[in-house]
């Protein structure tokens, strides 16, 4: 059984690895605060997935002027 200690809290690496990030956050936010997600990745050794860049789709510009009637 592997155990890592973070901020005085001993964590079983196998048990933490079996949890999802969101489940770990719900359980340990009181202990680690804003660092909870960082602690999860530190203990499990998993890499944090990189955020995909959001592509902002701009609406096509519409011509509001009416065409001259010839």
Image: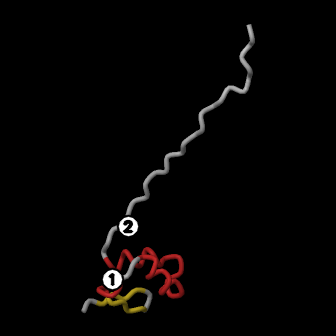
- Residue 47 appears at what percent x and percent y? 33, 68
Vertically, is 32 above or below 38? below
Of the 4 image quadrants, the one containing the C terminus is: top right
- For marks 2 and 1, give the CA distance: 16 Å
- Residue 14 appears at what percent x and percent y? 29, 86
Residue farthest to the left, as pictured = 1
- Residue 21 appears at what percent x and percent y? 42, 76
> In the picture, residue 57 is in which quadrant?
top right
Could you tell me which residue is drawn at 38 percent across and 63 percent down?
49
Could you tell me which residue is drawn at 42 percent across and 91 percent down?
9
Question: Nearer the observer, disc 2 or disc 1?
Answer: 1
The answer to whether 37 appears left or right of 69 in the picture is left
Which residue has dot 2 on it? 48
Q: Nearer the viewer, residue 41 or 22?
A: 22
> In the picture, residue 37 is in which quadrant?
bottom left
Q: Residue 52 has which mark?
A: none
> In the picture, residue 40 is in which quadrant?
bottom left
Vertically, is 27 above or below 50? below
Which residue has dot 1 on it? 18
Q: Nearer the viewer, residue 70 or 47?
A: 70
Q: Nearer the viewer, residue 7 or 21?
A: 21
Could you tell me which residue is drawn at 74 percent across and 13 percent down?
68
Could you tell me which residue is drawn at 43 percent across and 58 percent down?
51
Asked if marks 2 and 1 touch (Cβ < 8 Å), the reply is no
Vertically, is 9 above or below 40? below
Number of other residues with Cα within 10 Å of mark 1, as a class: few under 14, some 14 to 19, many 20 or more:
few
The answer to whether 43 appears left or right of 58 in the picture is left
The answer to whether 60 appears left or right of 17 in the picture is right
- Residue 64 appears at what percent x and percent y? 72, 27
Label 1 SS: helix
Q: Which mark is first along the chain, 1 or 2?
A: 1
């Amino acid at each position: 059984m592997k155990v890592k200690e973070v901020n005085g809290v001993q964590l079983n690496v196998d048990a933490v690895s079996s949890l999802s990030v969101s489940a770990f956050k719900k359980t340990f936010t009181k202990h680690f605060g804003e660092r909870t997600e960082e602690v999860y990745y530190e203990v499990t050794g998993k890499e944090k997935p990189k955020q995909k860049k959001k592509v902002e789709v701009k609406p096509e510009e519409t011509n509001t002027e009416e065409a001259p009637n010839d």
